[in-house]
Image (cartoon, rainbow, N blue to C red):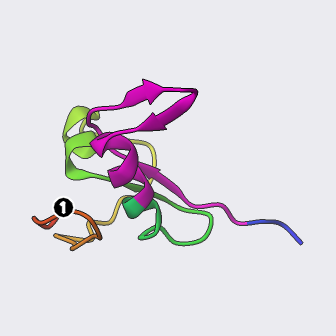
């Protein structure tokens, strides 16, 4: 059995305290990770805009998504 991990990436504030990471950037990365397919990667719109336009892999927009803990939809 090969495990299928999910990865979520976001840009935002990260706070390091008492050996723990927290902050909006960390929480948002956790939320978009849940949107990724098994074995997949899900990035926020902010990460997408920071990347070069031509990436060597297929991309699919999920559009705006409502995620727990965030009042506004994320892209």
Residue drawn at 52 percent across, 72 percent down: 37
Q: Residue at x 37, y 29 (%)?
A: 15
Question: What SS does tag 1 mark?
Answer: loop
Crowding around mark 1 (Cα neighbors within 10 Å: few <14, some 14 to 19, many 20+) is: some
Looking at the rendering, the stretch of residues picked out in magenta corresponds to: 4-30
According to the image, label 1 marks what residue? 74
Percent x, y for residue 73?
14, 67
Q: Is residue 13 magenta?
A: yes
Q: On the picture, is 2 further left or further right than 73?
A: right
| Magenta-span inclusion, residue 28 | yes
Q: Would you place residue 52 above or below residue 35 in this image?
A: above
> Can you tell which quarter of the image residue 19 is in?
top right
In the picture as drawn, the residue positioned furthest to the left comes out as 72
Q: Position of residue 6 (x, y in %)?
A: 57, 61
Q: How many marks?
A: 1
State which quarter of the image contains the N terminus.
bottom right
Q: From this viewpoint, which residue is outermost toward the front? A: 18
- Residue 26 sits above or below residue 62 on the image: above
For this rendering, which residue is in front, 70 or 74? 70
Question: Is residue 40 left or right of 50 when viewed as pictured?
Answer: right
Q: Nearer the viewer, residue 32 or 70?
A: 70
Q: Position of residue 32 (x, y in %)?
A: 38, 61
The quarter of the picture where the C terminus appears is bottom left
Residue placed at 62% from the left, 64% from the top? 39
Q: Quadrant of residue 65?
A: bottom left
Image: 74 above or below 11: below
Q: Horizontal placement of 42 versus 49: left or right? A: right
Looking at the picture, how far across and down is residue 44, in whole percent?
28, 52
């Amino acid at each position: 059995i090969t495990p299928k991990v999910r990865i979520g990436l976001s840009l935002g504030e990260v706070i390091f305290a008492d050996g723990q990471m927290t902050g909006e950037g960390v929480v948002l990365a956790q939320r978009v990770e849940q949107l990724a397919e098994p074995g997949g990667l899900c990035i926020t719109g902010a990460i997408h805009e920071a990347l070069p336009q031509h990436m060597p892999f297929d991309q699919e927009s999920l559009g705006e998504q409502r995620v727990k803990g965030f009042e506004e939809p994320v892209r």
